Amino acid sequence: MLFTSTSFELHVRDLAAARHFYVDQLGLPVLQETSAINLLAVLAGTSRLSIFGDRSDTFGKPLSQLTLGTQDIDSTIAQLRARGVTVEGQPVEAAGFMRFVVISDPEGNSVGIAQHLRDPLAAI
């Protein structure tokens, strides 16, 4: 199994304040802003940091997630299952961006496994 990239996801209550902090104060370059889903994505070193603003579909869910990239998600899922990892369901596609599944570590933290359909570090 080969993980090729990492990305991180944060959920915040105030996306404008997060944008000011990460973009204006820290100077991280913007990769994507999509108001329809309250998303601001920035480049943090060599990783994508996706910051989601106040979204009702995230209430009660973990506030952060590590995502590991792979070149072949189906093969990776098979390998994870063979190693005893519980993988629920099949990969879901984020239109034109990635196919992914979410698993949990022993403490219940979310770990995404994603096959990117385009460069996650490229600005759009």
Image (cartoon, rainbow, N blue to C red):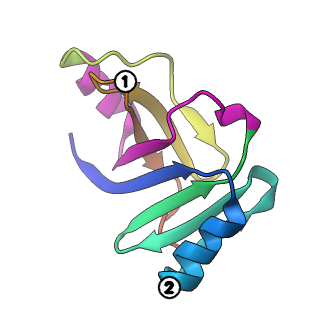
Residue 2 position in % (x across, y down): 22, 46
Q: Is residue 77 magenta?
A: yes
- Left or right side of 87 for 23: right
- Residue sitting at x 63%, y 76%: 20
- Left or right side of 10 for 8: left
- Quadrant where the image shows the C terminus: bottom right
Q: Amino acid at mark 2?
A: Gly
The disc, 1 or 2, on the residue closer to the chain's N-terminal end is 2
Can residue 93 be seen at all in this image of the molecule?
yes
Q: Which secondary structure, mark 2? A: loop
Q: Residues within 10 Å of mark 1 (few under 14, many from 20)?
A: few
Q: Nearer the viewer, residue 15 or 48?
A: 15
Q: Residues within 10 Å of mark 2 (few under 14, many from 20)?
A: few
Residue 61 position in % (x across, y down): 56, 30
Name the quadrant containing residue 50: bottom right
Picture layout, residue 49 above or below residue 124: above
Which residue corresponds to mark 1?
108
How much space separates mark 1 and mark 2, taking CA atoms? 32 Å
Which residue corresponds to mark 2?
27
